[in-house]
């Protein structure tokens, strides 16, 4: 079960994925927003890594640090939204050393609720909620049905990506893209793409035992888990950030 080591690797992997996809996130936002989502997220996650407590053995302390860094460093909508998500996640697992399956569900459900409470978006408003909510729903149902953490997180990642894909065909009702009306149709929502990266990072780190980078099935360069994994990453055929 995930512990502070897994949570730390999750945060670091999310920062890495955001850094690697910053350009694509910004291009998506340039199409239907103001072209800063990748810049915002990269700046925010860089600050997160710089400020992450080096010696903490508590998941909630790490998650709280992420939330505070994002809120203080990112000016756009996404900073407060992701920041609140991480702060709520921290509160949800306060005092826990090891996260049982139910704790992992509570963590991500609380994070999603933070986004919803702050942004007031619902499904199909063409926001990060369109990726976040199906991911949490699938994570919960998978774990409740007895799937392993690894399988449940992989299913959640796939649901987040499918949810992000579905934003392409809809008109926005929240955020800057809502000013565009029909013109937003045909473009992926940038925040949904970064949320897909969040669940990709979770799938690559929370469901696997600590073993350092390159560990089988675990680390950054692990087969089947990496950025360029077939059918997995945002750059996968037919599903990529630049697909539309
Ligand atoms: N009210 C909201 N609820 C949920 N997500 C939102 C909301 N407003 C914007 N977003 C998300 O934030 C993303 C834009 O983030 P970013 O570009 O960093 O901020 P800004 O829109 O201030 O420039 C959108 O693609 C969308 O997913
Ligand atoms: Mg923007």
Image (cartoon, helix red, strand yellow):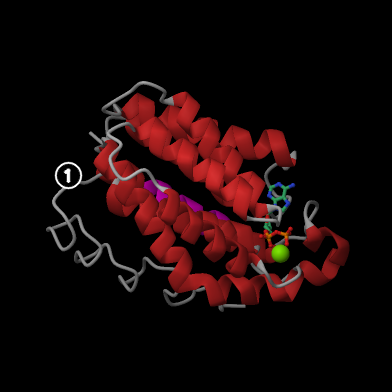
Residue 32 point in image, percent of width and height: 75, 70
Residue 106 point in image, percent of width and height: 45, 27
Residue bounds of the magenta highlight: 154-163
Residue at 49% x, 52% y is 160
Tell me the element at label 1. Answer: loop
Q: Depth check: give the residue in front, 230 or 68.
A: 68
Side of 59 relative to 133 (left or right): left
Residue at 48% x, 72% y is 21
Question: Label 1 belongs to which residue?
Answer: 209
Residue at 19% x, 55% y is 218
Q: Depth check: give the residue in front, 107 or 56.
A: 56
Q: Is residue 123 visible?
A: yes
Quick one: quadrant of the N terminus?
Answer: top left
Can you tell which quarter of the image residue 53 is in?
top left
Q: Main secondary structure of the magenta part?
A: helix
Q: Badge 1 local density, few (<14 within 10 Å), some, or many (20+)?
A: some
């Amino acid at each position: 079960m995930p512990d502070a080591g897994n949570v730390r690797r999750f945060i670091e992997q999310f920062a890495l994925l955001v850094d690697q996809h910053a350009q694509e996130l910004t291009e998506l936002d340039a199409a239907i927003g103001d072209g800063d989502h990748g810049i915002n997220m990269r700046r925010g996650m860089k600050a997160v890594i710089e400020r992450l407590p080096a010696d903490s053995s508590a998941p909630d302390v790490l998650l709280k640090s992420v939330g505070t860094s994002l809120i203080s460093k990112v000016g756009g909508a996404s900073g407060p939204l992701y920041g609140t998500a991480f702060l709520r996640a921290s509160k949800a697992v306060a005092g826990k050393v090891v996260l049982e399956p139910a704790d992992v569900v509570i963590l991500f459900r609380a994070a999603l609720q933070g986004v919803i409470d702050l942004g007031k978006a619902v499904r199909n408003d063409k926001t990060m909620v369109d990726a976040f909510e199906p991911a949490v729903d699938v994570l919960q149902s998978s774990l409740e049905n007895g799937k392993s953490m690894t399988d449940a997180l992989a299913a959640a990642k796939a649901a987040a990506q499918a949810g992000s894909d579905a934003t392409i065909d809809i008109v926005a009702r929240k955020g800057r893209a809502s000013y565009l009306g029909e013109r937003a149709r045909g473009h992926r929502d940038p925040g949904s793409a970064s949320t897909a990266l969040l669940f990709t990072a979770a799938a690559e780190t929370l469901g696997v035992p600590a073993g350092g980078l390159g560990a089988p099935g675990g680390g950054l360069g692990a087969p089947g888990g990496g950025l360029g994994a077939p059918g997995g990453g945002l750059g996968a055929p037919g599903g990529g950030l630049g697909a539309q």
